[in-house]
Image (cartoon, rainbow, N blue to C red):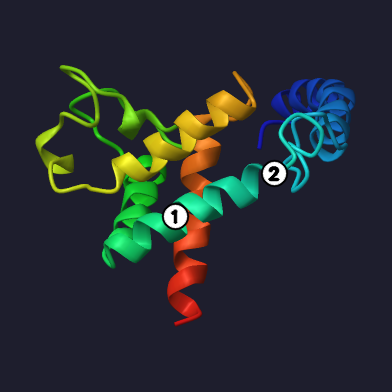
Amino acid sequence: MDPKLHQTILPSSFKLIPFILVAVFLLSTPSASQLSSDFYLFSCPNVERFVRNTVESASALDSTIPGKLLRLLFHDCLVEVLTVSPHTGCDASVLIRGKGTERSDPANESLGGFYVVDSAKELLEDLCPGTVSCADILVLAARDAVELVSLE
C-alpha cells in the first residue's frame, strides 16, 4: 500500500468514529415505537378478547378459517407483490379492496377469511373508534386461529 494513501485514509477514518458511536447508541436505546403486548391496555382494553371471540365464532361455522387467517397474514407480511407496489412488513394492505390493490392481484384470488377481520374491525370501531388498526387485528386473528387449532 502506498504510504501517502495510508496517511490520508487513516485520519479520515477516525473522523467517522463519533458518528458510528452515535448511530450505535441511537439504534440500541429503546424508543416509543417498540412493540408492546399491552399497547391497547388503556385505549381498547378488551381488543384481544373481541378478536378472539370473532375468530372462534367464525371457526365454529367454517373449520377452514384458521388456515385462511394464517395464510392471509402470510400474504400480507411476507409475500412481496412486485406488480402492485413492492413492500415488506405487516401493513394490512392485502385487505384493501379496489383495482390495482394486493387483494385484486391474481396471486391473491384464492385468499379467504377477509370477513373475519372485517367483522372484528366493525365491532372494534363501535367499541373503540379509530383505535385498533386492521394490521393489528389481522395479526391477533391469525395468532388466535393458530392457538385455536393447536388446542383441538
Placement of 90 over or under 69, stated as above or below: above
Residue shown at 23% from the left, 23% from the top: 101
Q: Residue furthest bottom?
A: 152
Residue 104 lies left or right of residue 76; in this view the side is: left
**Label 1: element kind:** helix
Q: Amino acid at mark 1?
A: Val
Q: Residue at x 25, y 34 (%)?
A: 81
How many callouts does the rendering have? 2
- Where is residue 131 drawn, in percent x and y? 64, 24
As measured in the structure, the alpha-carbon distance from the residue carrying label 2 to the one carrying label 1 is 14 Å
Residue 67 seen by the camera: no
Question: Which image quarter holds the C terminus?
Answer: bottom left
Q: Residue at x 51, y 40 (%)?
A: 137
Instruction: Write down the residue under mark 1.
Output: 55
Return the x and y of residue 49 as percentages of the image width and height.
63, 51
Farthest left residue in view: 106
Element assignment for label 2: loop
Disc 2 marks which amino acid? Asn
Residue 73: percent from the left, percent from the top? Answer: 39, 48
Q: How crowded is the residue under tag 2: few (<14 C-alpha within 10 Å), some, or many (20+)?
A: some
Q: Which residue is mark 2?
A: 46
Q: Position of residue 95 (x, y in %)?
A: 33, 32
Q: Name the one closer to the observer, 106 or 125.
A: 125
> Upstream in the sequence, badge 2 or badge 1?
2
Q: Quadrant of the N terminus?
A: top right
Report which quarter residue 96 is drawn in.
top left
Label of residue 119 in the image: none
